[in-house]
Image: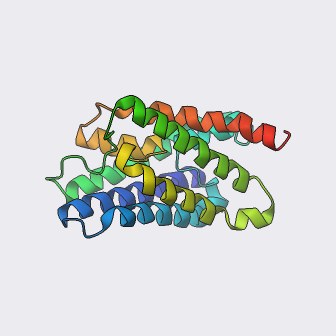
Amino acid sequence: MRKYLAEFLGTYAIVFAGTSAIIINQVSSGAITHAGISITFGLIVMSMIYAFGDISGAHFNPAVTIAFSIARKFPVKRIFPFIISQLAGAIAASFTLRLMFPDHILLGATMPAGTEWQSFAMEFILTFFLMLVIINVATGSKEQGMFAGLAIGGVVALEAMFAGPVCGASMNPARSLGPAIVSGHTEHLWIYLTATVIGAIAAVPVWKFINNK
């Protein structure tokens, strides 16, 4: 239960802080800015990795959990409880924001700015590289592990910085599911549930090949 609670709290914090930045930026006429939103996502991911990494492995992302299992770095029997904990944390965070900002329409939901397939391709590529970084720094040397939070948070901030205006830069099914469910805007949710998982899974054989596993 310690692991599941850590995944719940970490995902809650990520969705709450990240989508709060989006909401507050909109209601404050751009006080936070797009760069600020990207940095917020990167910093909260980094912080939660250092806070809960030794407890649960700090996945906070169903796509990462599934990919780690395929890479045989995570037991299959824990996939379902981990994903339930992550989704519950994301939905709880969005419900909290609904109470705080009852008039906000999207609650920070990820929405494609262009075509759906453009966002699908972008999310696939973003999650592929994010997972490649995660699986390398999380399973490498002890020295690498010390900088895992910084590396992963940096990738999240970087990808959100340049891709956010196009696809929302979700890279995480839970991050997209929470705001979509609570706001009722689920029309593009399939993009963020499928592209992210496929992208994370695609990183596994590349990681194995590069590391001769």
Q: Is residue 108 above or below residue 68?
A: below
Q: Percent x, y for residue 164? A: 39, 50
Q: Quadrant of residue 115?
A: top left
Residue furthest to the bottom: 31
Q: Is residue 162 left or right of residue 54?
A: left
Q: Percent x, y for residue 30? A: 24, 65
Q: Is residue 77 visible to us here?
A: no
Looking at this view, is 165 or 19 the one in front? 165
Residue displayed at 43% across by 49% down: 163
Q: Is residue 144 above or below residue 212?
A: below
Q: How many marks?
A: 0
Q: Is residue 19 above or below residue 132?
A: below
Q: Quadrant of residue 20?
A: bottom left
Q: Percent x, y for residue 132? A: 66, 46
Looking at this view, is 176 or 157 the one in front? 157
Q: Is residue 164 above or below residue 78?
A: below
Q: Is residue 208 left or right of residue 95?
A: right
Q: Is residue 208 left or right of residue 32?
A: right
Q: Percent x, y for residue 209? A: 80, 37
Residue furthest to the right: 212
Residue displayed at 65% across by 51% down: 134
Q: Quadrant of residue 184?
A: top left
Residue displayed at 29% across by 33% down: 186
Looking at this view, is 21 or 52 the one in front? 21
Looking at this view, is 88 or 185 the one in front? 185
Quadrant housing the C terminus: top right
Q: Is residue 108 left or right of residue 122?
A: left
